[in-house]
Amino acid sequence: MSDAAPSWHDWLMSDRPASRRQAALGRAYSGWRTFTRNRLAMAGLAIILALILVAVLAGVLAPYSPYEGNLTTSRLLPPSWAHPFGTDDQGRDILSRIIYGSRITLFIVILVAVLAAPIGLLVGTAAGYAGGYVDAALMRVTDIFLAFPRLILALAFVAALGPGIQNAVIAIAITSWPPYARIARAETLTIRQTDYIAAVRLVGASPLRIVLRHVMPLCVPSVIVRVTLDMAGIILTAAGLGFLGLGAQPPMPEWGALIANGRNYVLDQWWVAAAPGAAIFVVSLAFNLLGDGLRDALDPKAER
Amino acid sequence: MSHVTLARPVGRLLRAATLATLLAGTGAAAVLAATPKDTLVVAWAIDDIITMDPAESFEISAGEIMGNTYDRLVRLNIEDPSKLYGDIAQSWTVSEDAKLYTFKLKPNLKFASGNPITAEDVAYSFQRAVKLDKSPAFILTQFGLTKDNVEQKVKAVDPTTVTLEVDKPYAPTLVLNCLSANIAAIVDKKLVESKAQNGDMGYGWLKTNYAGSGPYKIREWRANEILALERNDNYHGEKPKLPRVIYRHVKEAATQRLLLEKGDADIARNLTPQDLQALAASKDIKTTDRPKGTVYYISLNQKNGTLAKPEVRQAFKYLIDYDGLGKTLLKDIGIVHQNFLPVGLLGASTDAPFKLDVDKAKELLAKAGLSNGFKVTMDVRTVQPVQGIAENIQQTAKRAGIDIEIIPGDGRQTLTKYRARNHDIYIGQWGADYWDPHTNADTFARNPNNADDAATKPVAWRNAWDIPELTKQTDAAVLERDAEKRAEMYKKIQAEFRDTSPIAIIYQMNEVAAYRTNVEGLRVGVTSDTTYMFNVSKK
């Protein structure tokens, strides 16, 4: 048993991998080792795992209903053992609301990542590989989207589509793909010159196949890093929309909306806005730390 | 002018003081400014003022300015606003057929300009208001006055007698109440006509100038900055105790609170319930309040089949936590009220049969065959306390199985949808346009034409509530000459409204003013026109 672990280590770190799978796993393992050496990144990862856990177990963890309060008995109570984060102006327990709110935050973050990253990747690689008019057209569209301030554009979309969490997600996704397109195009421009692409082309692969199977996988790491670093921005944009009343609608306990609600009481009942503010801060910071760690781990040019 | 130039350094001082307070707790009490002894400084959001012309002014803060600077024939008794007293009118009579009103003016009256006030000025003021036909003109034109006939209908018989002829035998209380409104303020004909250009009856000039005879005269108005009043030495009644009143435009409630606490303002007008709660402990500051003529309600669109069921209409009235709201969200800013006539109006009822009773509501819903609940939307303006109330009703309704989806919007969005009858549930407010029960009865209990293309769109119409019987009762109440009988009629209409309407009245607005303890005689008026600064003095 005692020598099983080192042998796994040796197998993964082998200089001469015997199969493609061993090579891929070995590469992932060495990335993970780089990543674990970064303490802050590990802290970020831990917070995000905790967030996922809280979101999944919200029903079990929350001490009260996040939607029902009592105006006469439990309104605007300061933090105490019964209500660790206090209660809000409708008499609802803020801790319970933040716990349920983590679901909404996670939902937004994941959906935006799933929607925006592929769009950016596709536009970027297509533009980079095709070049010429296609490149110019796609990149000018990207430029137009980049030229808009993100929150303003999201505001315009939400105003047109009507407030609501789905529309907020769509609005954020639409405004956050251009940077990914830029990165993917830059990567593609270097990759398309390489010998193995030329070899694939000689073999007779179609442009679609080349882009999907041979270009895109190499762009993915840098896009992942960028997406992770953007997560904080996405959370803040979502919170901003919620704060302006254009994101999640009452009684949904979206964190930004919670702060908007606490704004009226910020002078005398500070805890109403403080707890959701801290939650947004911690999670945004965690995503930033994780993104930094990932960049170090996934960067192919970094020294190993 | 000194106050104006002072404003900036004082603001800086204040910020410094605030910072110091934040840093050192209570250590900064030494930095105390004080307003001049002979000047009253009022911190108030006065950005709604668009004109100083009483024929056009219909805004809240402008209303107060008009009330303090212009005389009218009659004024409301501010202790009992269902009664009136003569202002420049010494006496008045109503003819047998209730169509001709004759006013006798007090002798030897003078405008601030020095011109004498004659019956000619009164007639001119009314004619001018009707001819200019700005937003508040309907208060006069509803009595059958038009641009063409107003010169025959309002006449100066001799220098101190003026007559007004109305088209129907209206209740004299209604007509006189309307004459206490700002639209009926008396302007200086000679002065205004001397400033007239191209026959505009001085409309361009009076926007920013003054031609009245009230206790104060308007010295200066700089939009969104300052409004200064000065004592009118020609005033016919008891002269104001303070020579000057300065309204400072202060938008933020928190800033107003700081100004008041530091003594840079004597009165603060837009404090939030949170501010008031915090100020309650201060020994330098007191508050005074008055229920105003605005009621807040939720209404159910009768075009929605579910909401049109009588049991559902009734159930909603049991799903509002009147008590809880009154003690929390509405504390200081509203009083629970369940009738469409606000307290203070002739005939206003204070009966409040409803309280939060989820079981009763469930029972009613079961009777309507909706024991499994239903889904419905509610259009909500995203301002407090409306949003808070909406969220609370959402919670209580949920307990009875009703899923309310809140659709937020700004005032214009929700109102446009409401006026087009496209909503399910609407939460909003109605403010009295003039101080007579008809103003609210006309909108809540009168719906002469429920068709989609109706000309008038009162609240009852907006909710497609077809009420031929109540409409008849409301029309009859307008023509009842005996004030007591008229009050009884309104009580009856309110009782029926409470029982059957798809509209649940939740509360009546309450206005609070906070003032420093050296200010005396401040009383918030029942309408915006009747907060009288000329009764205020300072120690």
Image (cartoon, helix red, strand yellow):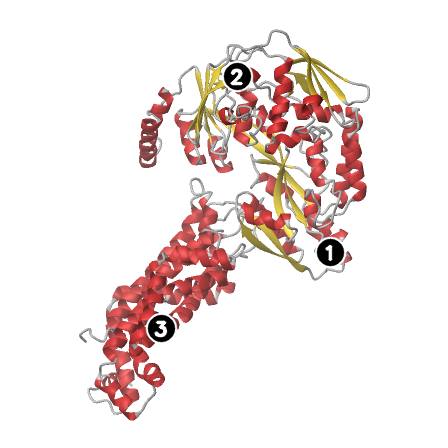
| A254, B301: nearer the viewer | B301
| B76, B517: nearer the viewer | B76
Query: Is residue B194 left or right of B175 when viewed as pictured?
Result: left
Q: Which residue is mark 1?
A: B365
Task: Give neighbour class at mark 1: few <14, some 14-19, many 20+ (Cα, 10 Å).
Answer: many
Task: Give neighbour class at mark 2: few <14, some 14-19, many 20+ (Cα, 10 Å).
Answer: some
Question: Mark 1 falls within which chain?
Answer: B
Badge 1 vs badge 3, beta-carbon distance below 8 Å:
no
Per the model, the C-alpha gap separating discs 1 and 3 is 55 Å
In the rendering, at what x and y percent does residue A137 appear? 34, 70
Circle on res. B221: none
Residue at 60%, 34% (x, y): give it. Answer: B135
Q: Amino acid at mark 3?
A: Val
Question: Mark 2 falls within which chain?
Answer: B
Looking at the rendered structure, the secondary structure element under dot 1 is: helix
The correct choice, above or below, for A113 with respect to B238 in the image is: below
Q: Amino acid at mark 1?
A: Leu
Q: Marks 1 and 3: same chain?
A: no
In the rendering, at what x and y percent does residue B43 appear? 45, 28
Q: Amino acid at mark 2?
A: Leu
- Is residue A3 in view from this perspective? no
Which label lies toward us, 3 or 2?
2
Circle on res. B191: 2
In the rendering, at what x and y percent does residue B214 appear? 55, 16
Per the model, the C-alpha gap separating discs 3 and 2 is 73 Å
| B504, B443: nearer the viewer | B443
Task: Give neighbour class at mark 3: few <14, some 14-19, many 20+ (Cα, 10 Å).
Answer: many
Q: Quadrant of residue B492?
A: top right
